[in-house]
Image: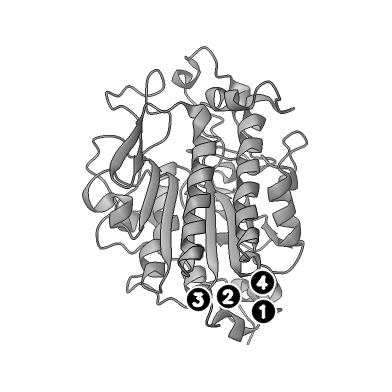
Amino acid sequence: MQMNTKKKWAVLLFACVLFTAIHAQKKPNIILVLADDMGYSDIGCYGNPLISAPFLDAMARKGVMATNFVTTSPTCSPSRASLLTGRYCTRSGITYVIGPGSKIAMPDDEITIAEMLRTAGYQTGAVGKWHVGDYGAGLPNNQGFDFFYGMMYSHDYRMPYVKSDTVIKIFRNATPEIVSPHDSILNKRYTKESIDFIGKSIDNGKPFFLYLAHNMPHLPVAFGAMAQRPKSSAAGALGDVIEDLDRGLAEIWKTVVKKGEADNTIFIFTSDNGPWINAPRRMYEDGFSKPYHVGAAGIFKGSKGTSYEGGHRVPFIIYWSKHTLENAVLTSPISNIDILPTLAQWAGAGLPNKTLDGESIFSF
């Protein structure tokens, strides 16, 4: 009997993995990085000729780069809900982008990756943009994360981009720490908090799960790029924030290496949806933002918010030393809902007692 498509590429991708290694006593650490609105071709390994992202390019060479990875939704909140639960967003009720005052939030009975891994002994941390609920059960600390540092929404939830009387804040767990943060500090702050979380988790002798959800390169990028002036990217402000993001990830990985955990840490990088090529006029009314600050979907038609491939197909890089093939390109279709069941198997965690729409890519 022939194997189905996913099983075929699972065998190809992980044939070099001993099953006993997955279930070894030492559980693997996990770093899951989510960019915001990054297009399919916004980094070098996916064909961008101007943006320099040496760390991500190196991870793609050392590990696996997928060319047919898609998200369940071409918009932010629904895509994130699917990623965190391994389920289509209709199951959680988060079917559109939610904002301040919304009555929609991640339900208490949903089981996130963090909740699943915490029951397996993991220290769990979320850094960056949350955007799946700002009250009650929807808050990060109520969805399995021991630690949270970041924003509840996108950094554009302010005038002139969004008409809102809500002031953007950076929270430490449920307590506001910075009011009206400048975009130029976000990458640096998120990098520092990620490094601190990783260091403390390792020092405490616990495996860690870090969900690092960057705000960039979602519009506006002009103010975030100010942190990099006068040394600017050949791709302008868009390149500035992506290159800054890449440098931050390199710093985080250096901490993993320094702590002796490089061979025991899974690194995953992807995006929530495609580039905002069709951004409305309000996103350019600040006097700084330009249409060319938006990324690109490569050869694919469409963009964020559309059902064409450009809205759904995004970068996906995964590296786990001695477990993933080196310099491999995966062309078979996979999705963000496959991440939860895959991590469950790799971490030796029990699957949630829920209907899952994704499946483990380690299924033989």
- Relative placement, left or right, of 359 versus 231 is left
Tell which tag, 1 or 2, sits nearer the viewer.
1
The residue that disc 4 covers is 9
Of the numbered discs 3 and 2, the one sitting upstream in the chain is 3
- Amino acid type at image mark 1: Val
Secondary structure beneath dot 1 equals: loop
Q: Nearer the viewer, residue 61 or 40?
A: 61
The residue that disc 3 covers is 345
The residue that disc 1 covers is 17
Q: Position of residue 74 (x, y in %)?
A: 48, 44
- Which quadrant of the figure contains the N terminus? bottom right
Q: Residues within 10 Å of mark 1 (few under 14, many from 20)?
A: some
Distance from the alpha carbon under mark 3 to that under mark 1: 13 Å
Q: Quadrant of residue 226?
A: top right
Of the numbered discs 3 and 1, the one sitting upstream in the chain is 1
Distance from the alpha carbon under mark 1 to that under mark 2: 10 Å
The residue that disc 2 covers is 362
Q: Position of residue 312 (x, y in %)?
A: 54, 47
Given contact means CB atoms under 8 Å apart, are the residues at marks 3 and 4 in contact?
no
Given contact means CB atoms under 8 Å apart, are the residues at marks 3 and 1 in contact?
no
- The structure residue drawn at horizontal position 63% and vertical position 36%, both measured from the top left corner, is 244
Q: Position of residue 103 (x, y in %)?
A: 22, 42
Secondary structure beneath dot 4 equals: helix
Q: Nearer the viewer, residue 254 or 298?
A: 254
